[in-house]
Image (cartoon, grey):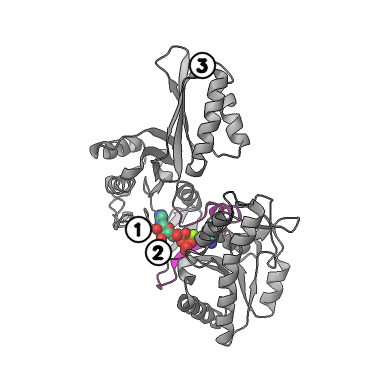
């Protein structure tokens, strides 16, 4: 008998029929003898609808009240699902984040789980019940309801699996696993059998929304095997696990894209110590997350141009802050572009192989796609391009690195340097 935490995403519980079909699936697993904790998302579109509703009420919704509102989406599905299971003759109990002991910090809208009090869930499991937990929500040490950020139900599931020392965590979604790139963008995307936590973390951070970033962090920290599967088929899916010798030995294992960022440039910044601090300190103080930063020399001697990216949602605010600082420090002018995208290639094999960047740049150049910014880490290279070329860039990079070919058939296993 195993303890399994399963999570079903919004499309899997989008309506009454789908909730019933997921309930059937869960009940079959229970009949087979496993103990089950089921984490559910809100119905597809519900969280978006709640956000729109809040914006209708207030242009800047109070963060605490917004979380109270958003947390209701998941409360709908856990209740409906538990009704369905009970109608099938099995015991189930729905639990909100509060009832399930999911304690977070105070950051409304993007709270981090700090502790899980497991007693309430384990007690219900001991009673033989299927425990149905609302994803995406918790509460802080003052009892306020918090939410974990968009896509956060994955994190609820993996964190619960870690805290309960579950045998496995299964994430059920609308695709059959983790692919070499978003299968909804390129039909040649290939499903991976296994992927390391490290690569998955990089893919999630670079925009592959199939898993919430922090769910992968939890998985990696507590060594929780994460299976990503479809709730519509019986395919075994992808296992996210520790890197091992059996893993595909390839240089590049995935391509990601993100349209969520915007670029800001400050020209002719005086090239003296302390300027970067003066520019970025107020941005950090405003809680804005800066991603790429590039400083290059300006045509004016003793001056530098600084470009950086921020979340699109913070673009206007960042421009205003940058303009203020620019005036104070006597820099040139501030300009930006919210219509950019970041495409990234990811693979642990990049650590030991050279020439990867030039393949990437060549593939983009052949399509006349201009690169505005580049950033690299040990296992990834990202390029900022015009947003309108995103899908094209993903496809040409996928082709350039031949990701459609299965390396286990001996086609793409690269030589070590
Ligand atoms: P859920 O609602 O089940 O949490 P999400 O929409 O959050 O589902 O995540 C699944 C989606 O992630 C897929 O429909 C797919 O478009 C997208 N996706 C992006 N990159 C990848 C990838 N590399 N592999 C699989 N899916 C991906
Ligand atoms: N319902 C939340 C969202 O749409 C959380 C989730 O689905 O994981 O972002
Ligand atoms: Mg998701």
Where residue 410 sits in the image (x, y, percent)? Answer: 29, 54
Q: CA distance from mark 2 to mark 1?
A: 9 Å
Q: Which residue is labeled 1 in the image?
A: 184
Q: Is residue 387 left or right of residue 135?
A: left
Where residue 90 sits in the image (x, y, percent)? Answer: 59, 84
Viewer-side residue, 128 vs 105: 105
Q: Residue furthest front?
A: 57
Q: Is residue 305 left or right of residue 83?
A: left
Q: Which residue is labeled 2 in the image?
A: 175
Q: Is residue 40 left or right of residue 258?
A: right
Assess disc 2: are there few (<14), some (14-19) or many (≥20) residues with their C-alpha within 10 Å of its C-alpha: some
Which of the marked residues, 3 or 1, is nearer the chain's N terminus?
1
Whether the residues at callouts 2 and 1 have beta carbons within 8 Å, the answer is yes
Whether the residues at callouts 3 and 1 have beta carbons within 8 Å, the answer is no
Q: Which residue is labeled 3 in the image?
A: 271
Where residue 151 sits in the image (x, y, percent)? Answer: 52, 57
Viewer can see residue 341: yes
Q: Residue furthest right?
A: 142
Residue 234 counted in the magenta span: yes
57 w.r.t. 416: above or below: below
239 w.r.t. 402: above or below: below
């Amino acid at each position: 008998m195993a303890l399994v935490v399963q999570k079903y995403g919004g499309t899997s519980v989008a309506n009454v029929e789908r909730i019933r079909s997921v309930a059937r699936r869960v009940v079959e697993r229970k009949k087979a003898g496993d103990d089950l904790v089921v984490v559910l998302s809100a119905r597809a579109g519900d969280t978006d609808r709640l956000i729109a509703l809040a914006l209708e009420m207030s242009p800047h919704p109070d963060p605490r009240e917004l979380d109270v509102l958003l947390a209701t989406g998941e409360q709908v599905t856990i209740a409906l699902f538990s009704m369905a299971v009970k109608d099938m003759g099995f015991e189930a109990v729905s639990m909100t984040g509060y009832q399930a002991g999911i304690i977070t910090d105070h950051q409304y809208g993007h709270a981090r789980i700090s502790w899980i009090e497991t007693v309430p869930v384990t007690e219900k499991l001991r009673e033989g019940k299927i425990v149905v937990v609302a994803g995406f929500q918790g509460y802080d040490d003052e009892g306020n309801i918090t939410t974990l950020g968009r896509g956060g139900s994955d994190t609820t599931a993996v964190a619960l699996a870690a805290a309960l020392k579950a045998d496995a965590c299964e994430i059920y979604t609308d695709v059959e696993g983790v692919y070499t790139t978003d299968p909804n963008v390129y039909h040649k995307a290939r499903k991976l059998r296994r992927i390391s936590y490290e690569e998955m973390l990089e893919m999630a951070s670079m925009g592959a929304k199939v898993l919430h970033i922090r769910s992968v962090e939890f998985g990696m920290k507590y060594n929780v095997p994460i299976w990503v599967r479809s709730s519509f088929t019986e395919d075994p899916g992808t296992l996210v696990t520790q890197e091992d010798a059996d893993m595909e030995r390839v240089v590049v294992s995935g391509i990601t894209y993100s349209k969520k960022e915007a670029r800001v440039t400050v020209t002719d910044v005086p090239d003296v110590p302390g300027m970067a601090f003066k520019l970025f300190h107020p941005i950090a103080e405003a809680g804005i997350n800066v991603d790429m930063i590039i400083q290059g020399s300006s045509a004016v001697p003793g001056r530098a141009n600084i470009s950086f990216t921020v979340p699109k949602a913070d673009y206007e605010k960042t421009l205003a802050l940058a303009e203020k600082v620019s005036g104070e420090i006597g820099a040139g002018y501030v300009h930006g572009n919210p219509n950019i995208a970041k495409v990234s290639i990811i693979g642990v094999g990049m650590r030991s192989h050279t020439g990867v960047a030039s393949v990437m740049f060549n593939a983009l150049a052949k399509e006349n796609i201009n690169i505005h910014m580049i950033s690299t880490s040990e296992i990834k290279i990202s390029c900022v391009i015009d947003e309108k070329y995103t899908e094209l860039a993903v496809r040409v990079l996928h082709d350039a690195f031949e990701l459609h070919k299965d390396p286990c058939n001996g086609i793409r296993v690269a030589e070590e340097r």
